[in-house]
């Protein structure tokens, strides 16, 4: 009767006449699992669930289009309305009022320190920095985690789940803080974050342990990040805990970047920044731009790829890695191999050997071949390695350029662009700048380019200062922040400055074996 949301004219008529709601619904966007295309759900379901039962990720069944005329239209709007415009294409089961509720709450100057939300700075002629760190935690994860709580609570209501959502997060730093700020005092939610006691930077620890809000909890673990993550996974799948949660009207959900609700907000800023550049006369409508993204889990760069597939004129997508260069190798050889040494770098948010969102890209590049995806990711789980087909290798090379940069070059780049352009960038962004320079040398491609700048330099003051000054400092955290402010002539972000004298609220530090008890205690279900 209905195939892929397509109607024959007569069917369309019948549905409209007898089942008007159904007709509208069936025409909407559905989300499929990358490992089983026959699983189809609407966005509210996909966002609530986070991940498909078969372990696959939810992806839109088709990519909505975006014309240049629409980009022109968007250029006249403020960021929240640009976001609304894009979300309407993807979240077709949401009403306009529901989307506006989400965008208006998330993207305002209550939460961001700049009217434009995503600021653009010209580094040098034709090269622009897309500063995605003007949110409350000074990292680009705010762009998605400011809105995810609204998506999630709206979705839960839409599918008639009368439950309070409990977000459990294992973090190595940035995600935990961004999730805490996002979910802080959002009605119908509670959030608990675990971080490795000795595995985060002093600023990151301060950010988390001083977190405000009545529905938040933070706990240090005597262990490393993997211990945090394993513990959280075990709690998620514990039957006894689940039953107790059910009885108490609670349910777990995830704020991790496998959730579609974290990916779709990232598409917006690529479209928005293109509109801003064109509106400002930096490019003409229709001109192609290249995009460079410092990459870890492949979420941010995948969002740029979606924007391109919608119709945004993007040329090359440049994927920048630190020395954990599993993605560089993958783009160049078509072999994904995580069996390699793991390095702790000065761009820690990119220290990742399993880039989960790559699964979504490969699903697209294989023409939604769920059985091949299942096979490859089964191999990854079993042997830590898979090799894609020649066809996929060809498209990969056509669409992407992969490069990497070690800590020395990262710091040298921070130093050089500070001297040359009086611009101060953080360690993650510097990786992107360096790989972009390498790309230009290798190809001679001088297309105008947008570089995603993913964190404020103040978040990584020690490394940035060392790069600028050329020697390691023994100053304390806030002396370094002050010094960095003098050198960069940038104000210290208010959200970081405010933490200096804020009281520490969370002092718990527990053993791995006590995580479940801790969670049940916090939730009052022990
Ligand atoms: C998370 C993060 C990245 C990596 O982004 P992905 O979407 O995981 O590729 C890069 N830079 C910073 C500062 C981050 O916090």
Image (cartoon, grey):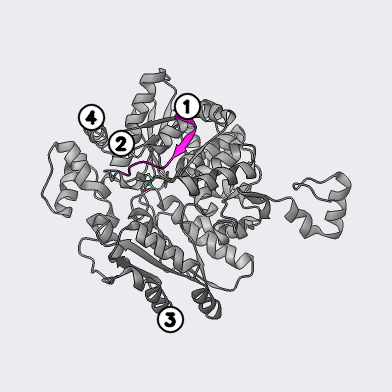
Q: CA distance from mark 4 to mark 1?
A: 27 Å
Measure how far apart labels 1 and 3 are at the Cα level.
56 Å
Nearer the N terminus, badge 1 or badge 2?
Answer: 1
In the image, is 525 to the left or to the right of 497? Answer: right
Q: Give the residue pinned by disc 4.
A: 416
Across and down, in percent, residue 405 comes to 31, 33
* Disc 1 to disc 2, C-alpha distance: 24 Å
Q: CA distance from mark 4 to mark 3?
A: 54 Å
Q: Dot 4: what SS?
A: helix
Q: Which residue is mark 2?
A: 430
Which of the two marks, 3 or 2, is nearer to us in this view? 3
In the visual, does 435 lie left or right of 12?
left
Is residue 339 rendered magenta in the image?
yes
Asked whether residue 257 is in view, the answer is yes
387 in the magenta segment: no
Q: Tell me where the magenta segment starts and ends, as one range.
A: 332-342
Residue 382, percent across and down?
49, 48
Q: Residue 238 location, x and y as percent?
A: 49, 71
The residue lying at 26 percent from left, 62 percent from top is 197
Asked if 232 appears above or below 405 in the picture, the reply is: below
Q: Are marks 1 and 2 in contact (CB under 8 Å)?
A: no
Q: Nearer the viewer, residue 508 or 503?
A: 508
**Dot placed on the residue nearer the N-terminal end, 1 or 3:** 1
**Residue reaching furthest front?**
383
Residue assigned mark 3:
524
| SS label for mark 1 | loop
């Amino acid at each position: 009767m209905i195939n892929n949301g397509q109607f024959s004219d007569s069917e369309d008529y019948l549905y409209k006449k007898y089942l008007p709601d159904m007709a509208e619904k069936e025409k909407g966007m559905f989300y499929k699992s990358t490992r089983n295309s026959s699983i189809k759900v609407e966005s509210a379901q996909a966002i609530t669930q986070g991940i498909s039962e078969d372990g696959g990720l939810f992806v839109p069944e088709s990519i909505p289009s975006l014309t240049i005329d629409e980009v022109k239209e968007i250029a006249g709007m403020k960021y929240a309305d640009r976001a609304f415009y894009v979300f309407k294409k993807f979240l077709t089961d949401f009403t306009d009022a529901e989307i506006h509720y989400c965008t208006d709450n998330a993207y305002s100057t209550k939460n961001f320190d700049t009217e434009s939300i995503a600021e653009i700075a010209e580094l040098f002629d034709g090269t622009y920095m897309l500063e995605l760190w003007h949110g409350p935690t000074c990292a680009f994860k705010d762009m998605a985690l400011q809105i995810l709580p609204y998506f999630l609570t709206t979705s839960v209501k839409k599918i008639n789940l009368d439950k309070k959502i409990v977000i459990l997060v294992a973090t190595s730093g940035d995600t935990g803080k961004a999730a805490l700020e996002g979910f802080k005092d959002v009605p119908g939610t509670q959030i608990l974050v675990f971080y490795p006691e000795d595995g985060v930077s002093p600023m990151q620890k301060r950010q988390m342990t001083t977190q405000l809000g009545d529905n938040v909890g933070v706990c240090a673990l005597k262990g490393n990040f993997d211990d945090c993550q394993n513990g959280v996974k075990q709690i998620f799948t514990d039957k006894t805990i689940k039953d107790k949660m059910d009885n108490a009207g609670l349910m777990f959900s995830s704020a991790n970047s496998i959730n579609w609700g974290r990916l779709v907000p990232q598409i917006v800023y690529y479209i928005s920044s293109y509109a801003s550049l064109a509106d400002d006369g930096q490019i003409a409508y229709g001109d192609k731009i290249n995009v460079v993204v410092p990459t870890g889990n492949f979420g941010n760069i995948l969002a740029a790829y979606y924007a391109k597939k919608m119709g945004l004129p993007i040329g090359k997508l440049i994927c920048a890695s630190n020395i954990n260069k599993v993605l560089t190798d993958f783009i160049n050889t078509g072999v994904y191999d995580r069996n390699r040494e793991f390095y702790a770098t000065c761009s820690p948010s990119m220290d990742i050997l399993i880039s989960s969102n790559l699964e979504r890209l490969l699903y697209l590049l294989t023409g939604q071949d769920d059985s091949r995806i299942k096979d490859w990711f089964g191999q990854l789980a079993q042997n830590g390695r898979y090799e894609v087909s020649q066809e996929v290798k060809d498209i990969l090379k056509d669409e992407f350029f992969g490069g990497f940069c070690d800590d020395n070059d990262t710091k040298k780049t921070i130093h050089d662009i500070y001297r040359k352009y009086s611009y101060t960038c953080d360690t993650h962004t510097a990786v992107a700048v360096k790989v972009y320079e390498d790309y230009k040398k290798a190809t001679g491609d001088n297309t105008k380019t947008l570089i995603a700048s993913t964190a404020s330099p103040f978040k990584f003051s020690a490394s940035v200062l060392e790069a600028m000054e050329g020697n390691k400092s023994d100053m304390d955290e806030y002396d370094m922040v002050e010094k960095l402010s003098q050198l960069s002539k940038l104000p210290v972000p208010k959200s970081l400055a405010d933490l200096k004298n804020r009281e520490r609220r969370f002092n718990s530090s527990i053993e791995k074996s006590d995580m479940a008890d801790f969670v049940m205690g916090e939730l009052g279900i022990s």
